[in-house]
Image (cartoon, helix red, strand yellow):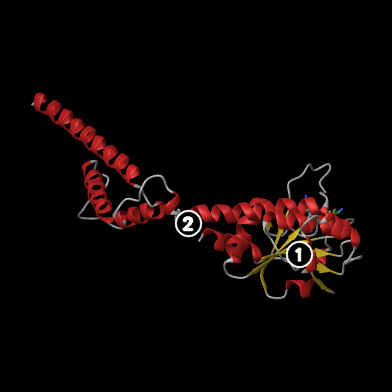
Amino acid sequence: MTDILKTDLLKKVRIVLVNTTHPGNIGGVARAMKNMGLEKLYLVEPKEFPSHRAFQRAANALDILDNAVIVNTLDEALVDCGLVVGTSARSRGIPWPMLNPRECGEKAVSEATEHEVALVFGREDRGLTNEELQRCTYHVHIPTNPDYSSLNLAAAVQVLTYETRMAALLAEEGTLPDLNDWDIPPAKHDALERYYEHLEQALVDIDFHNRDNPRQTMARLRRLYGRIRLDEMELAILRGMLTSIQRAARQLKQAVNGNSESEK
Ligand code: SAH
């Protein structure tokens, strides 16, 4: 289950390099991509490609270079993309919606479930032009030292593809745990139902919840716990906590009643 999700999402995020001058950088980018599980490389008018130096720098990521798509314009590289993010080593022109690298990874992964995503990188000497940046929905800046802000092209690709991979891994964690890998069996339906009854009673006892005006509280709590998929041990801990909370509430009420009795 998990493998399908991870690889499928990363495959839908393409790296677009515009007018790259040094073929060694293209090789470095291929290697960075393959390390992070991305596959699609688009080259917009590279100065020199295919090139021996690109293949040298790519180490074992030769398949990425073999499958690289070479196009004449940025628009051709972005055809069918639902999200385009442009990179910039510094801010310029009019302000544009910005993402930080983490947000960029999260957005790329969440949108990759719906459509193709492109991360666009510029020339080594002068980055992307304003016209190219304006073709992007968002801009992303890697927060480097302001006095020395420009990363090597392959290093910039490494940072953003790492964030994309991390977002994919976290997305996996957010899905249901693979119960075969879990140390404790999942709580069963009837135990969960008894827990919800206990929870509701405890919430009534502490005057948090009113059965005559329940609103959506119990439905929302069921949904919350459903997202977590409680195991038997966790459920036992929660039941124990509720029992203690109820006892404390009872003692408090008795103490208050006792005081008011003695004041009579
Ligand atoms: N002198 C150029 C820097 C180009 S660096 C300029 O000032 O724009 C080459 C490419 O690496 C950039 O176009 C961008 O795609 C990427 N890059 C380098 N540093 C970056 C940073 N801090 N944040 C985002 N992308 C960066």
Which secondary structure, mark 1? Answer: helix
| Mark 2 or mark 1, earlier in chain | 1
Tell me the amino acid under the disc marked 2.
Answer: Thr
Residue that appears at 68% across and 55% down:
36
Q: Tell which of 10 and 111 is nearer to you.
A: 10
Q: Tell which of 131 and 3 is nearer to you.
A: 3
Quadrant of res 117: bottom right
User: Residue 90: percent from the left, percent from the top?
Assistant: 80, 52
Quadrant of res 171: bottom right
User: Residue 101: percent from the left, percent from the top?
Assistant: 68, 52
Q: Is residue 89 in sight in this rendering?
A: no
Would you say 253 lies left or right of 2 here? left
> Distance between the Cα atoms at labels 2 and 1?
31 Å
Would you say 167 lies left or right of 210 here? right
Residue labelled with disc 2: 175
Give the number of the disc on residue 63.
1
Residue that appears at 60% across and 54% down:
167
Quadrant of res 83: bottom right
**Compared with residue 54, is residue 115 higher up or lower down, i.e. above or below?**
below
